[in-house]
Amino acid sequence: MSANPDQGVRYDARHAAVYDRKIRQLIPGYETLHELSEFLLATLLPPDARILVAGSGSGEELLRYARRGPGWSLVGVEPSTDMNQLAAAKLEEAGITERVSLLQGKPGEVVLGEGYNAVTSLLVMHFLPDDGAKAAYLKALATALRPGGWLLLADLGGERGETGFERLFATWRAQQDASRDRPEQVALDFTHLGTNVHPLAEARRASLLAEAGLELVQEYWRALGLAAVLLRRCE
Ligand SMILES: C[S@@+](CC[C@H](N)C(=O)[O-])C[C@H]1O[C@@H](n2cnc3c(N)ncnc32)[C@H](O)[C@@H]1O
């Protein structure tokens, strides 16, 4: 990923090409987050559900959800053309193009449709600065949901400089240093994480969620400062 003032980060061709391998190294528990999100949706949703995947990236979520719910229809929204192309190729190869469509752009800027049973946003919103961009993003996702619809939201959370946040961030760095063989790349990744990722303190997240008309139901996954929560659009 590289800095892009317009959206926080940009996933270009170079990043897209290595994304699937790289994200699994970088995010502790990436597979588990996705597996549990998939099963949580299966627990919550009817057989004919409509799901919006915000920041659908290289298609990991779209493929998983399409396989888990044979009657579900899915829309992915993703600003990176390179990531979208990767996702499209995987969907084509898996033969599941007719239940899945891909939108090019960002929530708030492209028409997402409405009345979704569920929206997911895994490892996306933390790239947006808290200067109105997170608020607009959450509002767009909430608007796409039907009243009572579910939002699965995973991000790095906490407050930079706060002891607990820094302890877990240092633990993550130590784990990456020990488990990867290119220290210069780990250093680069952590520079990006330090500048391009904008974690939210819990109280601030609560007020942005309330503003968007979303209520916190429960946390369902955590790895250090990264956590996934289940939210519901207020009726
Ligand atoms: C770390 S990847 C996560 C992709 C996917 N959700 C997954 O779990 O594998 C973050 C993705 O969010 C996309 N993204 C960045 N800004 C966005 C925005 N404002 N709205 C939607 N997606 C965005 C990036 O292009 C990238 O594909």
Image (spheres, rainbow, N blue to C red):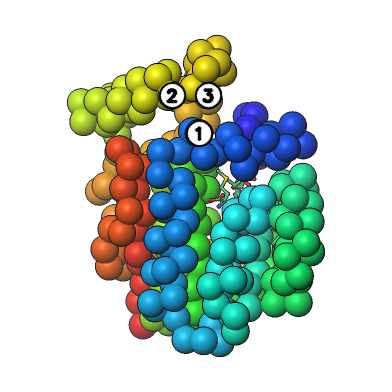
Label ID, residue 179: 2
- Residue 151's x, y, as percent? 43, 67
Q: Residues within 10 Å of mark 1 (few under 14, many from 20)?
A: some
Q: Quadrant of residue 89?
A: bottom right
For marks 2 and 3 on the same chain, the one whose residue lies earlier in the sequence: 2
Using the rendered image of the protein, determine whether residue 126 is visible from the camera's viewpoint.
Answer: yes
- Name the kind of residue labelled 1 in the image: Gln
**Amino acid bearing label 3:** Asp
In the visual, does 155 lie left or right of 136?
left
Q: Is residue 196 left or right of residue 109?
A: left
The answer to whether residue 27 is left or right of residue 161 is right
Residue located at (42% from left, 53% from top) = 33
Pointer 1 or 2: first along the chain? 1
Q: Marks 1 and 2: CB-CB under 8 Å?
A: yes
Outermost residue toward the top in this view: 184
Q: Which residue is mark 3?
A: 189
Which of 99/79 is in front?
99
Q: Secondary structure at mark 3?
A: helix
State the image coordinates of residue 37 (x, y, percent, origin top left): 43, 62
In space, the residues marked 1 and 2 are separated at their CA atoms by 8 Å
Badge number at residue 40:
none
Q: Position of residue 106 (x, y in %)?
A: 65, 55
Q: Quadrant of the C terminus?
A: bottom left
**Percent x, y of residue 133:** 52, 48
Q: Which residue is mark 1?
A: 25
Amino acid type, label 2: Ser
Q: Marks 2/3: CA distance?
A: 14 Å
